[in-house]
Image: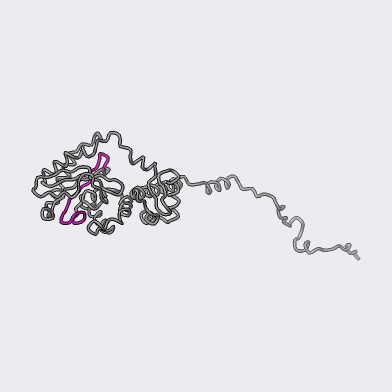
Amino acid sequence: MASLPPNRNVHSADVSSGSPQSRTRPAPTGTPTRTPARGRAKQAADTAPDPAAAEEAGSRTLRRGLQLLDAVLAGGQEGVRVVDLCRTARLERATVYRLLATLIDSGYVVQQGRFRYLPGARAAALASKPASGLPNMAVRLQPVLARISAASGDAAFAVVREGPLSHCIARQVGTHPVQVLVIQVGTQQPLGVGAAGLALLAALPDAQVAAITTANAPRLHAYGGMTPERMDILVRATRERGWSVIGNHATRGVLAVGMAVRNAGGEPVAAISVASTLARMPRERQQLIARTIRESLQALPWEDA
């Protein structure tokens, strides 16, 4: 009879796992897992910043900062509130504060009190620097005013922008017995309440228009009950028409026609208007005066500007 093999202990691991060759041993703890070179390159590419996206984000931040600076400049020495900046720029308060902090650090904006911001020293210095080679605007436009006034018989005016205001720099009296001298040289008023100022306001970018209207809002009512909403309507109408017309706001019983003056680069640098009584300003005559202003400005040389 065959003898039985000697007894040995049978472990459960031997039964379940089979032969030693078939058992799978786990990797020792702490052994680093190697990523193939191709995988490492792809992972680096996925985490690297996108240059185009970064450039777009930088451009967007710059545009927002310049928009806020325009709004602060439009507020002049009265300053502009944070809530108005948020409304004008359509930005969240946190974003406005962050951009203002950069402008303050750079010297372009200063804070007054808790909530108002004014142009800083660097912004004021830039605004005060005369453009090299640009002749005196009043001297340049005086012959144009004389031509327009002679053709219409009414008074003609030239204004430039100073922050949120218009500033009359020249005036030409006409030959008609009744002259409507609504403003004189040196007069300042909110940009947009007069025909020349309205034409100049409408020629500016939307962001500047919004900033100027917001800055002038507290004093608009004194000009014939003007409101920011009414001003927006007049700006849109001026852009569609190509010239401005406004009456009974700065002076009752008066209507004026205006047009922006653009330099050789197409930038608005001034505006001209003609004012008269309502009786002398029917629609056909408004159109005639606008055409006279346009033709007179087309003859104005800007090569040396």
Residue stretch rendered in magenta on the structure: 246-266
231 displayed left or right of 78 = left
- Where residue 45 appears, as percent x and y from the top left, is 53, 46
Residue 221 shown in magenta: no
Number of callouts? 0
Residue appearing at x 29%, y 45% in the figure:
162
51 displayed left or right of 14 = left
- Where residue 224 appears, as percent x and y from the top left, is 22, 58
Residue appearing at x 25%, y 35% in the figure:
135
Colouring chosen for the image of the structure: one colour
- Where residue 271 appears, as percent x and y from the top left, is 22, 45
Out of 252 and 130, give the one closest to the viewer. Answer: 252
Q: Quadrant of residue 298?
A: top left
- Where residue 204 appears, as percent x and y from the top left, is 29, 48
The C terminus appears in which quarter of the rendering?
top left
Out of 141 and 190, give the one closest to the viewer. Answer: 190
